[in-house]
Image (tube, grey):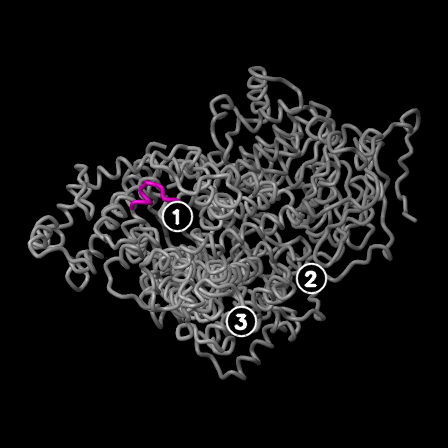
Amino acid sequence: MPSKRGQAHFVAELEDTPVAPVDRLDESQKARSTWADAWDSMRRRPMFWISSVLIVLIAVIALFPGLFTSVSPSLGCDLGKSNGGPEAGHPFGFTRQGCDVYARTIFGTQASVTVGLLATALVTLIGVVIGSLAGYYGGWLDAIVSRVGDIFFAIPTILGAIVLMSVLPAATPTSVAFVLSIFAWPQIARIMRGAVLSATNSDYVMASTALGVSRFRILLRHVIPNSIAPVIVIATVSLGTFIVAESTLSFLGIGLPTSVMSWGNDISQAQTSLVTNPQVLLYPAAALSITVLAFLMLGDILRDALDPKARALR
Amino acid sequence: MLWYTGRRVLQMIPVFFGATFLIYFMVFSLPGDPIAALYGDRPPAPGVIEQIRAQYNLDKPLIQQYLIYIGNFFQGDLGTTYSGRPVSDVMAGAFPITFRLAMLALFFESVAGVVVGLIAGLRKGKWFDASALVVSLLLISVPTFVLGFLFRLIFGVQLGWFRTTVSSEAPWGELILPALVLASVSFAYIVRLTRASVADNLNADFVRTATAKGLSRRRVVTVHVLRNSLVPVVTFLGVDLGSLMVGAIITEGIFNINGVGGTVYKAIVLGESTTVVSFIAVMVVIFVLANLLVDLLYAALDPRIRYAK
Amino acid sequence: MSQTLTDTTPEGTESQEQPLLQIRGLEVGFQTQRGLIPAVRGVDITLYSGQTLAIVGESGSGKTTTAQAIIDLLPGAGKITGGQVLFEGRDLTKLSPKDIQAVRGNLIGYVPQDPMSNLNPVWNIGFQVEEAIKANGLAQGKAARARTIQVLQEAGLSDAADRLKQYPHQFSGGMRQRVLIGIGLSARPKLLIADEPTSALDVTVQRQILDHLGTLTRDYGTSVLFITHDLGLAAERAEQLVVMYKGKVVESGPSQEILANPQHPYTQRLVSAAPSLASRRIQSAKHASVGDTAIYSGDSLDDAMVSRAAERESAAPVKDLISIDNISKVYRIRKKGLRTDELRAVDGVSFGIQKGTTTALVGESGSGKSTVAKLVLQLESITSGAIEFDGQDVAGLKGKALLKFRRRVQPVFQDPYGSLDPQYSVGNTIAEPLLAHGVGTAKERQARVKELLDQVSLPWSSRYRYPSELSGGQRQRIAIARALALKPDVLVLDEAVSALDVLVQGQVLNLLTELQTELGLTYLFITHDLAVVRLVADNVCVMQKGRIVEAASTDDVFDNPQQAYTQELLAAIPGGNFQFGR
């Protein structure tokens, strides 16, 4: 028997609670793809603009160092100015050899950025191809790739690079990039493989298969576009870490030869004058750090923009 | 758990052989004369060359060379350094020092990293979080060797709080500054990882249930949020050991520590490739074993892994 | 001014009884990038001690937010922006964090929806129950352990003592929910908030657990605030009903009355569309008896469905379009050690589907119904048996022949959020099958896409939109349009409406029915919801553990179920026992 205590039968006024037609599409809203959405959230963040501007600046310096200094970094060295402080036209002072620190820092950009860019490109290419094939086709291909990847992964990148660089003759930015990518590809391959696996198991792939779309076309048109986001993030960050790796190798003396101007070499040579003339070391170090910082910040921004969980909250 | 351990050990074996073989392959079978590669600018005397060839079994096929090498490895013969001393001897003296350094670094990076990350995650968006993020970005951007120089300059030379070089017995106290340098990059990564994990878990359903039970906020954060956030940190530590080893080479080099890293550093700088290769081979083996331990720790922390297929 | 239709002023002294829970003008909002978005906009609810009240609404109605706001369980971005929550006279919105903590668990318990994500995976069950007991001051030390076992046993876990050290992932969904119920009731609170406590569970398990919950709350004298989207369930389990829509209460009062006489247009729509109520109505209409609960029918689909079914039944029998003959699907799973185990997902299933009809495959999780769908679509290969489509054997088709088959048999899947590629615009998604089969020129394809969007009642402008901007119902309509692109003969609908809100579900079912008549389609309709089957299907096959347990026309199955399992499923349809007030 229904209890007499309780709410009265209350009905709200229709004006207060208008009932909309069921599931009507709001035509006034504009269309937004995932990439447009990501772009929209990125451009609102000041850190995106800061890091982008820095990266463009660094790229320009690497490509056209002559625009930024008229001093020739190697020819203009004057031993008489050894370890000299800053003076007009030479804002960063002089190295032990009497070379202009500012000019060397500017010209050093090219080598470091080249290694970083090349290594990233190689690693991304290898990683994406291997990772997607392994994840999509599975089976013995996947098993072999995973085992091989594990083996390379077991050798930390720089340790492996040290071994290889120790036994190789003279190094160039290209060879350093190659050596680094030999040991760094498993990371990207794994990430790509994971993303491909989850995309392959999605309902839209199953739907496309049932519609009659060919297997390869599904890989190209559906799986890869939906798996590429985490790889983009990690590739951006990797650019930064490869630049650091190159400088570490140069610092140890087994990276680029001293004839090539790079930040790592400069820092290494500046060790001895650290106490007396710290700026000789600090300027190239600062250039290096700012470059890496720019790529890391961009990587963070990209991750936030492309992360599906974060998108849901916007 | 036992079954899981067994499987991981089984998976480790091909990796162990594969990695050591890869190193061996890189050194001894790239085009060119391995002796020239190893000894580079300082070729040994002609008579000695024959001895070295015999010592490294260079006249035998590669696989056989490798198997002999691995066989020796298991018997404790890890090769010889450039100057002829057995690697195992040098290792015995150097390892304890590096071990102390590494333990200190691990302690700093995990404890400080997790605590800072936790607070940052709890106060997401506030000033502590923002500064933690900035500091961690800076620490990752600045290479370890630069940081080493900077710290040594500021805290050693200018402020005089620490010795600038470490004595040969390397007691714990002297290793604090180098350990801080070594830990810095990993600390930054752990802060970011913990922060992201904590921020995620704060919105998790099971945290809401815990709150609904009537638990105090403190308990919810420590027993539920933090505990679950530790799992990815442990996974990270395994991979991070690799960079710790690289960092050890640099840090011990800068601070002149007689550890494994310092030995390798000197050998690299002097071009003594035989030493470099032998030591790095050992380091890789240690890396593989340490990763196995980390996997087991991970299974201890996350019961779902133990029961997974 | 509200309209009061029932006079509930009781005689005597009861008129001064204070309600246990009184929510007045509650307002809750969420902070987002675009400012404060209101989720609850002035809600009034009154609950007396010992009563059960259900809040019913679709997604976005604010029902869960209202419940969570009572004990401040709102996620970070949410906050109460106005109104009061009076519990035994105290305003909970004004309490300090420490005071609210004392209320939680002790005075007000909470049972959440999804048992997997609501238990911490890294701690064992005993630990998680014990900490609730300790936190609410019920017992400490050894006594707490004993109490834990008692709580779990009362919740229905018979071997509680043995299971304390086990982890959540080792329990089944039903058992996990029992643990959560145990935790919620462990301190014998005065009020229990149950947020869709059984929506994630199988239908038969749902019934057991809700019955058990009802017994416990009756024994302890606990009031229950029930959140659900299922009106039939709400009416069956609660004496009082509150219907919410877009953050406001549109109608509230005694359940029986609202069912019989809904006044607000929204409530009327809900009552006429809810499958559990609709199926009840259809049965009542066919076998009218005194004492059947009167349920409003408004402009429901019932009559149209029933007459269509009658029409079909009187037509001459036709040869099967799809004939499934003793098929089995065996999976090999690797277990510990090197042994492999067999999983017979489908075990000797046979049935036929006639052209132009809707055949439903009904079963709970693990019954194998989805696997059968995949086998029919040739997305997986059968281990044994044969499937014939239009006289042709389908197994082992490859290349061009397979492509031809695919043109004629198309799927619509369950998850509207997963079955459309997020990177593809709507237009491209619908056009993809046309491209894959090389149909027509670009212009012709465009025209076809327009035609299809028309058929599913979506505007032409939507072709530029992306799935992430659309609702579940809209996405599902696009999936249907895509499936129809090649003018197939058969649509395999695998739980195609299960993830949709009630009204949207009704709309899509309506659409499917119209399309069937218009285009002469044949449907294989996979679902776990027997009530929906009553609305759309001509024939039913009930599956359990990979086998068909009963197969007959819908009428026969509902009027005269032969097997015990079928009877169980029928009994489990919410709203079966309309007993108001216990």
Which quadrant of the rendered structure holds the C terminus of chain C?
Answer: top right
Q: Residues within 10 Å of mark 3 (few under 14, many from 20)?
A: few
Q: Position of residue B171 (x, y in %)?
A: 39, 32
Q: Are marks 2 and 3 in contact (CB under 8 Å)?
A: no
User: Callout 3: residue from which chain?
Assistant: A
Question: What residue is pinned by disc 2?
Answer: A23
| Residue range corresponding to the magenta coloring | B255-263
The disc labelled 1 sits on which kind of residue? Answer: Ile
Task: Establish whether labels 1 and 2 are both on one chain.
Answer: no
The disc labelled 2 sits on which kind of residue? Answer: Asp
Q: Position of residue C144 (x, y in %)?
A: 58, 18
Q: Residues within 10 Å of mark 1 (few under 14, many from 20)?
A: many
> Tag 3, which secondary structure?
helix
Q: Residues within 10 Å of mark 2 (few under 14, many from 20)?
A: some
Q: For the point 57% across and 41% down, which residue is it? A: B116
Residue A165 on the magenta segment: no
Which of the two discs, 2 and 3, labels the residue nearer the N terminus?
A: 2
User: Callout 1: residue from which chain?
Assistant: B
Q: Nearer the viewer, residue A138 or C93?
A: C93
Question: What residue is pinned by disc 3?
Answer: A56
| Vertical side of B256 occupied by C490: above or below | below
Q: Nearer the viewer, residue C28 or C530?
A: C28
> Tag 2, which secondary structure?
loop
Question: What residue is pinned by disc 1?
Answer: B254
Q: Is residue C97 visible?
A: yes
Q: Is residue C492 visible?
A: no
Depth check, mark 1 against mark 2: the one in front is 1
